[in-house]
Amino acid sequence: MFVMTSDISICGITVKPASVKWRCSVSDYTDTCTIELPLSLYTKTTGEKTPSAQSYNRLPFKEGGDVLVMLGYDGKNTTRFMGKILRINYAVPLQIECEGYSTDLRGKRFTKSYKKTTALQLLKDLCADTDIIIQKKNIADLPLTNVCFKDYPALEVLDWLKKNCACRIWFDFDKIYLAPSKFFCKKDTVKLRPGWNTVKDDELKKSDPTESVQINIVAKDTTGKSTKTKANKNTSTQKSKTEKQLKVRSGLPSDYLKQVASEMEDEQNCKGYEGNITCFLIPNVEKSMTVEIDDPKFPDRSGLYFVETVEGEFSASGGRQKLTLKHYGDN
């Protein structure tokens, strides 16, 4: 029999939660977590006898404090979330709302101009004086020209990059990634067998697009001249075809844009299984991992899947991980 255990630190204080919910995704650079705690254990009173004398402002936690959530069974806990306190809700139970390391950019303004730079240097400047870790191996080699930010909200710089460079941006705990593809950072492979170490698998369904989609990426330079970039190949064999355009800023490398177009086409034309599957807290699953599904009952669903999102719960009702998966197909 497995016993659920936790190792949770808030502002350096070890706590025992009433419940924990978390969400991490490669499609969103904001990881979130909500921790519920017994209010009476973490508040101090002023010494007066009336209930109104209880001072919730004397909590040992403060907004911006560090949060580490490790969960598992029988003391074998693994990291599920790292971040900071976003806000404290004075309710019963006490709610601690947390956000991943993107919260370090909240409220920060950014002013800088570049004639020539790179995405790596831009992120280094943007994340200076924060706890966000910038590593060259995690950032695509992406040149940028004539970029100007004046008193710009720091978080919106990430949105600017996503919109103008068609890149993927996400956090892996305290490390930031920028890449043309969500497969840029592949992690370990875990094995799941429906009906054995899963709870629910009826939301894993086959995608069957009715027509082929071709992605054309269009960039227009300062003279008004447009260039069009297509994927390395169109993976769909369907005869009916729809062309879609994605506009980006000029000067981005052709190879980079081809990767972007190829991945977008693969997503649009995927015929494999995708959707959600719910499992227990073991094996530990993180975004960017690969899930190998072995399904003897429905062999068509067996194969490799990419983990796009993990939504977890930990409470007296049990521990669960809801995984959003995308079939790798023939890639």
Image (spheres, rainbow, N blue to C red):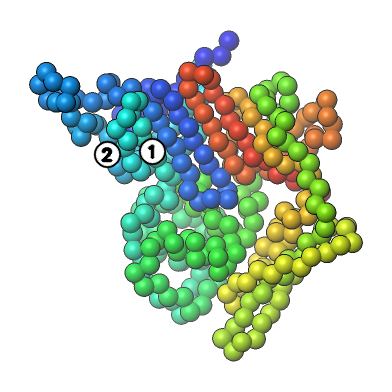
Residue 55 sits in which quadrant? Answer: top left
Q: Residues within 10 Å of mark 2 (few under 14, many from 20)?
A: some
Residue 297 sits in which quadrant? Answer: top right
Which circle's residue, 2 or 1, is located before the other in the chain?
A: 2
Q: Residues within 10 Å of mark 1 (few under 14, many from 20)?
A: some
* Left or right of residue 98: residue 120: right
Mark 2 = which residue? 62
Marks 2, 1: nearer the viewer: 1
Residue 279 appearing in the image: yes
Vertical side of 111 occupied by 330: above or below: above
Circles 2, 1 touching at the beta carbon (< 8 Å): no
Of 76 and 153, nearer the camera is: 153
Vertical side of 47 occupied by 142: above or below: below
* Left or right of residue 27: residue 242: right
Task: Please tell me which residue is depicted at 54% across the width and 56% down the height of the picture.
Answer: 169
Task: Please tell me which residue is depicted at 69% across the width and 69% down the height of the picture.
Answer: 245
Residue 141 appearing in the image: no
Q: CA distance from mark 2 to mark 1?
A: 11 Å
* Left or right of residue 200: residue 11: left
Vertical side of 45 occupied by 322: above or below: below
Expressed as whole percent of the image width and height from the top left, the position of residue 175 reads 48, 49
Expressed as whole percent of the image width and height from the top left, the position of residue 224 reads 61, 87
* Left or right of residue 232: residue 140: left
Which quadrant does the N terminus fall into? Answer: top right
Task: Please tell me which residue is depicted at 32% across the width and 35% down the height of the picture.
Answer: 89
- The secondary element bearing badge 1 is classed as strand
Disc 2 residue type (three-letter): Lys
Disc 1 residue type (three-letter): Glu
Expressed as whole percent of the image width and height from the top left, the position of residue 237 reads 88, 57
Question: Residue 97 bears which disc, if any?
Answer: 1
Task: Please tell me which residue is depicted at 63% across the width and 36% down the height of the picture.
Answer: 323
